[in-house]
Image (spheres, rainbow, N blue to C red):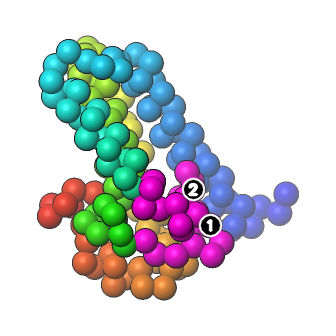
């Protein structure tokens, strides 16, 4: 094992994804997959729709779970990527927020807040990688919000 920057970068990427999946699985397992409050159901429906739309739009660019761009990746600016840079992360956050609405307040918000923190770390890390690997990223990123249309 050489321990060079490439390997360290991969380890960081896998660690972030592992934490993201752990929090997501916890919220799905401990929360309610179809909660009674309508706000939870709406978040689940919208989050799932946004996530599926984003994955469908990303396919041509070699979708990956880790933040590292696949060799030969290309910039995707169709589908939900016309509006925000990270629609898959928005989908995950909405879906998991819907799941946590029936958990005890402190427990649900603590785990969901942890997931939100992980997603923010991941998207900033991913954007550094995309800036280096995708021609046109700077222009694309300058015209779109990161996660919430018109706000952030």
Image height check: is 69 above or below 115? below
Q: Is residue 106 visible in this depiction of the protein?
A: no
Residue beneath the point at 28% across and 79% down: 142
In the image, what residue occupies the spot 65% across and 58% down?
10
The residue to which callout 1 is attached is 70
Q: Nearer the viewer, residue 25 or 54?
A: 54
Of 59 and 9, nearer the camera is 59
Q: Earlier in the sequence, mark 1 or mark 2?
A: 2
Asked whether, in this view, residue 10 is left or right of residue 55, the answer is right
Disc 2 secondary structure class: loop
Q: Which residues are magenta?
A: 55-76
Q: Residues within 10 Å of mark 2 (few under 14, many from 20)?
A: few
**In this orientation, does residue 76 appear?**
yes
Residue 51 lies, in percent from the top left, at 38, 47
Q: Residues within 10 Å of mark 1 (few under 14, many from 20)?
A: few
Question: In the rendered image, which quarter contains the N terminus?
Answer: bottom right
Residue at horizontal 20%, vertical 15%?
36
**Mark 1 element type:** loop
State the residue at coordinates (65%, 72%). Answer: 71
Above-or-below relation of 104 to 78: above
Asked whether the beta carbons under mark 1 and mark 2 sit within 8 Å of each other, the answer is: yes
Q: Mark 2 = which residue? A: 64
């Amino acid at each position: 094992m050489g321990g060079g920057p490439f390997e360290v970068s991969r380890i960081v990427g896998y660690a972030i994804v592992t934490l993201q999946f752990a929090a997501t699985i916890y919220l799905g397992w401990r929360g309610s997959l179809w909660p009674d409050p309508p706000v939870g159901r709406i978040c689940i429906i919208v989050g799932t729709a946004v996530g599926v739309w984003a994955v469908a739009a990303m396919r041509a660019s070699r979708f990956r779970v880790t933040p590292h761009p696949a060799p030969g990746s290309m910039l995707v600016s169709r589908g939900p990527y016309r509006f925000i840079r990270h629609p898959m992360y928005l989908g995950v956050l909405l879906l998991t927020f819907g799941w946590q609405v029936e958990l005890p307040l402190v427990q649900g918000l603590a785990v969901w807040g942890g997931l939100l923190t992980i997603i923010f770390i991941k998207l900033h890390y991913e954007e550094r990688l995309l800036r280096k690997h995708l021609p046109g990223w700077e222009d694309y990123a300058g015209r779109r919000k990161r996660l919430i249309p018109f706000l952030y």
